[in-house]
Image: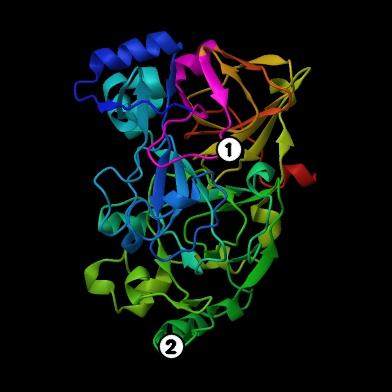
Amino acid sequence: MSKQSTRITKDIGKTLETALDAGGGLLRLTPTWVPRSFLHPGLRIKLAPEDTYAFGAHRGGIDERWFASTTEAMNENRTPDEGLSYVAFEGRKFQLREAVAEARPRLIGGRMWDTYKRWPVYSKFFDNMGPIPHHVHQRPEHAKLTGQEGKPEAYYFPPQLNNVDNNFAYTFMGLEPGTTKDQVRQCLENWFKGDNKILELSRAYKLRRGAGWLIPAGVLHAPGSLCTYEPQWGSDVFGMFQNIVEGRFVPWDLLVKDVPRDKHQDLDYIIGQLDWEKNVDTHFVEHNALDPIVDKAASGPGYTDKWIAYGLIDGRQLFSAKELTVEPGAKCVLKDGGASGWITVQGCGRMGKLRLQTPVMIRFGEETEDEVFITHEAAAAGVEIENTGSEPLVGLRYFGPDTHGKVPNVGDART
């Protein structure tokens, strides 16, 4: 890990070009920490314990680390750059968002730039001591009304980040088949009368290390206490539907945070944000559970590449993720259909000219050698990865929309 001080670079054009040339299309990213005032950190994302409240106790503890993010965290009282990833190069740093706007197709490919004019996805480690409220991420048509975008997401539970379960390694998802909208309405009407009991309308699923879930926008979920790797669409919209969690009261404001102001008391509108059919799906596991699938075409002697987040959402390939394991002494050439954000979760080695090292503990503001943005240019040319250590080198990487000609379908791992 590097402790060198860096200065913010304002005119990034020449610095970015030099960094891309020096790194062979690879960019070193620095840790991006995000606090949540309403959650209890799980203390497994390598941040030094004394820095858990580095943003101030009033902001809450840091329980998330965001990867290759050009999406702002929509927290109250947030810092201006909260949630945004920075590129570090020779003592200078600048935002990945600025780099994408500067280099455009070279970073994310022409089709993605022409369609979205940004890197439209991000991923994170999400780490809590216990469960969080049953909540929903708005669908595009509802998020648009507040000038935002909808947010589907996926879960993967890396074994390396889950040496302990913490308090509740189960996640409530969706609603019990047969649930009515009137029952959900009653829960919202009882918001200030004690526990609104919305979990009585749902079902909890045991979380498994090395597996995951696909959660479309509009589906209720109350994530449990395994540390989670979450590839997702580039948005931070949500609405909490549960009012008391582990004795803590959730304010109404967090239910209507991303609801038009004139709809803050409109229960029909609030409930209408739910994708009802997907919530009461009688085959929820079959349609949403993800088990890793080895990509045989991308694997070889000494290395294995697995799909960990995949499937289509409403017929669209919005994001995906893979886990690469390289055995000690082995090397491989990684060649993908587009850019990706990489985080190293075990071991050490190198990616192209960049060193990879999994940290044991990170001080707030410290630079590390575990995170890389693999540009479209580098992905197309191929990047050599070598394990120089004595244990497996493991990295997770996520991709943006339509990166691959084809991804597995949900359920393919069970066929």
| Coordinates of residue 252 in the picture (x, y in percent) | 35, 76
Q: Name the mark on residue 190.
A: 2
Q: Nearer the viewer, residue 378 or 319?
A: 378
Q: What amino acid type should be assigned to the residue bearing mark 2?
A: Asn
For the residues labelled 2 and 1, say whether their Cβ atoms are less than 8 Å apart.
no
Residue drawn at x 49%, y 69% is 133
Give the left or right position of residue 105, taking residue 23 as reference. Answer: left
Q: Nearer the viewer, residue 179 or 319?
A: 319
Determine whether 54 is above or below 18 in the image.
Answer: below
Residue drawn at x 32%, y 22% is 104
Badge nearest the viewer, 2 or 1? 1
Determine whether 394 is above or below 174 in the image.
Answer: above
Question: What residue sits right under mark 1 in the picture?
Answer: 360
Q: Which residues are magenta?
A: 354-381
Q: What amino acid type should be assigned to the residue bearing mark 1?
A: Val
Residue drawn at x 27%, y 59% is 145
